[in-house]
Amino acid sequence: MVKVRFAPSPTGFLHLGSARTALFNWLHARHTGGQFLLRIEDTDKVRSDKKFLDEILEDLKWLGMDWDEEPIYQSQRFDTYREKAEEVLSKEKAYREGDAIIFKVEKGRNIEFEDIIHGNITTNTDTIKDQVMIKSDGSPTYNFSCVLDDISLEITHVLRGDDHISNTPKQILFYEALGYTPPKFGHMPLILGPDGAKLSKRHGGVSVEEYKREGFLPEALANYLILLGWFPGEDQEILSLEEAVKLFDINDMSDVQAKFDIQKLRWLNGEYIMKEKNEDLLPLLKKQLSATKIDTSKFADEYLTKLIDLYKIRMKTLSEFAGLTECFFQDDFKMDEEGKKKYLDKEENVENIRIFANRLEGLEDFSHEKIEKICRDIAEERSLKAAEIIHPTRLAISGKTKGAGLFEMMELLGKEKVLERMRGIQT
């Protein structure tokens, strides 16, 4: 049975690169009917924090992943690491240096392994110095504890970032010393920023938590991360995790470094928002509105759902919703100054708005169809293009030059509010 693992360190939030690593391991396990396991690398007692671990586990679930057994914690296995180091020492393959136990690296030999992604990789041991297994403070080193954990978990495939390639020959030496066959290794090229440098803060957010807070949907972020290193074929870019599980083949993973493109992610997120049911978006958008101090309890869910329907095709992230819909929640919305100069500082436009408002006054059925008919009738009567009434009116009721369909906006805002705003305009 295929067994893979993901090994987060609870010293910070889940990095996008780590999330991608977890996703590929999870996909391989689910595609093959294998197991996806978790190992918590919490040997750094000073920097490890339960709040980070809780967030990491929550982010994995948020992205759609599950795991097959309870996670193991390295901090609970120190006795095992020391015991195994003593075993290697007793075979005269290691030596003591004070309280530290150090593995003797045999010089002059080549260590080869067939990387799933890169092919054959060979390293000469002359380039590897003797390896510390147990530090002088009694804690294990990364490479030694990692090997012992993977042996204990019976890991068959280790999928991780390219930055671990240099660790692999050292780990193979430990497998040999302990009498075990190494698993298969696959090293993924790292995610780069648009400038070709390793993805970092200067390229924008680098943690899953930041993208979650910004209003990216988990399906969209998972979809995008999967495309950074594997392609489903036939130029298919939008696929669910269920589809990815069926199509995924570890042998099709790319050995080319992938560049993170925030605009591509925003586009993909917008596609997912458009497909999402309004009722499913409702609680997410309520949370976004609350973050901007808008009290959603004052507005009925029916009102909010209609508003979502108007704007879901205009959002790339959920965090944009509050800014786009400000005028639906408060009267003291910001006025676009350039738009005001262009449309509302002209007496003829203000006059057209007044005429429009007066006609609407007698409208009993305040539906977008009836509102639009009145607007177009006025335009025809006054030999105007409808846009010459629509643009100034939009600015008058919303403060913006762009938005959802004007007549649908007016219907949702309601007759009283619309007339009040239209008649409040002064040149």
Image (cartoon, rainbow, N blue to C red):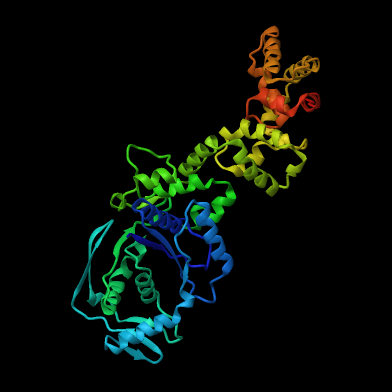
Residue drawn at (36%, 57%) of the image: 34
Residue drawn at (56%, 42%) of the image: 317
Where does residue 287 sit, x and y in percent of width and height?
66, 47
> In front here: 380 or 347?
380
Quarter assignment of residue 321: top right
- Left or right of 427? Residue 161 is left
How many labels sit on residues? 0
The answer to whether residue 206 shows anywhere in this view is: no
Residue drawn at (39%, 59%) of the image: 35
Quarter assignment of residue 323: top right
Residue drawn at (44%, 83%) of the image: 79
> In front here: 214 or 79?
79
Where does residue 234 sit, x and y in percent of width and height?
33, 37
Q: Quadrant of the C terminus?
A: top right
The answer to whether residue 111 shows anywhere in this view is: yes
- Left or right of 295? Residue 28 is left
Placement of 136 over or under 116, stated as above or below: below
Where does residue 186 sit, x and y in percent of width and height?
31, 60
Q: Quadrant of the N terminus?
A: bottom left
Placement of 68 over or under 236, stated as above or below: below
**Residue found farthest to the bottom:** 98
Where does residue 365 sit, x and y in percent of width and height?
75, 17
Placement of 162 over or under 389, stated as above or below: below
